[in-house]
Amino acid sequence: MSFSSLTIQKGRLLSTIHDTAEKFGAKGVWGPESTQTGVCRLSLGDYDKQVRDWLIQETTALGCKVKVDEIGNIFSVFPGKKDGIPTGMGSHLDTQPTGGRYDGIYGVLSGLEVLRTMKENNFVPEYPIALVDWTNEEGARFPMSIMASSVWAEQQTLEYAYNLKSVFENDDATVEQELKRIGYLGPEKASYKTNPLKAHFEIHIEQGPILEGEQKEIGIVVGVQAYVWYKVRVYGKAQHTGTTPLPARSDALLATSHMIVRGNELAKKHNCLFSVGVLTLQPHAVNVIPEFVEFTIDIRHVKDSGLAEILKEVKEEFPKIAEASGKKLSVEFEHIFTSDAVNFDKECIKCVTESAYEIVGQSKSREMLSGAGHDSCATSTRIPTSMIFIPSKDGVSHNPEEYSAPEEIATGFEVLLSSVLKYDAARKD
């Protein structure tokens, strides 16, 4: 039995997306319809626990064996004709504070719909197929993106992840504490060696404007650009704003503003991306010159070598700015996370390409790089991996107005289903 012979319950995936959004963290009204809100479902929070419980209930009812590892990743394994390492489908259910209904969520719920479709058609794959919900992909509450998939891939230690603290005020919880609190510090070792996957397929909204702008329906993702996160700390001197002449100041915030501008200038020079997403300062008083600023930088480039080049210049330029801004100013850097440029597996890409061409045609498909990091970046370091993109309206994401049309949701799911079954059949051969 092939993809084309399976009966698909049209509209159910979209209903599941909207139902779970309304039950588990709906927030950010942007239109008059009940479905026109975003989702705020922070990793390991109460809504995250509730949607996890729901997912396990749903997949268990389909006959899956469910495993939870020690970093909270959920593996729902649908049985195959033969025992073997499962073919994986995965993404994440956590969101940004200003998240939409589709980022990550679409990938997990599309995987659930694959399992439902196989069950309803009495279709048994050659080998087991696993749906994975990866913990804290966003890095919004705990400051490390693609956290748990990186631990599973042994790119980061479990201890490091456990000790990450929430970045939000009045929330000093750690990852380990919250895993225990919500009951998702599982018994399974978080390792690709002891809990392996044969491959990993991830479907995702593009989060950018390319597919929509070119009127393409499917993005065949062949890789992901490199990125690096740093904390930058600028130290100055607190002084009275009314009595300290401008030349005598060591204003940490003023120096920071020059650094941010310079970072964007360097990004234009190197044809890459630079952003500051978090900024805090002290003493946070109206009439006191800031003596301390901490901010994050996010730099992205399609090549590892290009990323290294701009980072080198940032580390050279920022201290020069501090030195020129006041005698008592200094700057230091703390590395948070690096994701190297990713090239996905050719066999997995072939399965996606063939599926896309069969379902929407070559003219409506295109190969592309992802500008954002995903759990597939981590899995690709250990196992064959590829991704599928569908269009995002106006390229909007990490915003309640994030939107993909119902027909785009349905088409992408069909490509995922076909890709996974093609890979499963190839394993048999």
Image (cartoon, grey):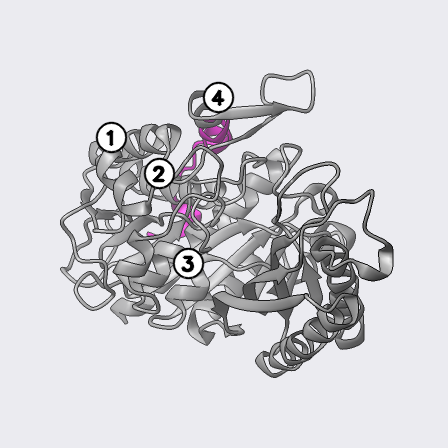
In terms of sequence position, does the residue under pointer 4 or pointer 2 come before the other? Answer: 4
Measured as percent of width and height from the top left, residue 163 is found at: 31, 53
Q: CA distance from mark 4 to mark 2?
A: 18 Å
State the residue position of label 3.
201
Q: Nearer the viewer, residue 167 or 151?
A: 167
Residue 420 shows up from this direction: yes
Res. 227 visible in picture: no
Residue that numbered label 4 is attached to: 22
Which amino acid, mark 1? Gln
Mark number displayed over residue 44: 2
Classed neighbour count for the residue bearing mark 2: other residues with Cα under 10 Å, few (<14), some (14–19), many (≥20): many
Q: Amino acid at mark 2?
A: Leu
- Chain-order first, disc 3 or disc 1: 1
Asked if the residue at tag 4 contacts the one at tag 1, i.e. Cβ–Cβ closer than 8 Å, the answer is no
| Crowd rating for badge 4 (residues with CA inside 10 Å; few <14, some 14–19, many 20+) | some
Quarter of the image containing the C terminus?
bottom left
Q: CA distance from mark 1 to mark 4?
A: 18 Å
Mark 3: which amino acid? Phe
Give the x, y percent position of residue 86.
24, 59
Residue at image position (46%, 55%) is: 145
Upstream in sequence: badge 3 or badge 4: 4
Which kind of residue does numbered mark 4 sit on? Glu
Task: Give the residue at mark 1.
Answer: 57
Disc 2 or disc 1, which is closer to the eye?
2
Q: Nearer the viewer, mark 3 or mark 4?
A: 4
Q: Element type at marker 4? A: helix
Q: In the depicted view, which residue is nearer to us: 44 or 357? A: 44
The picture quadrant where one finds residue 237 is bottom right
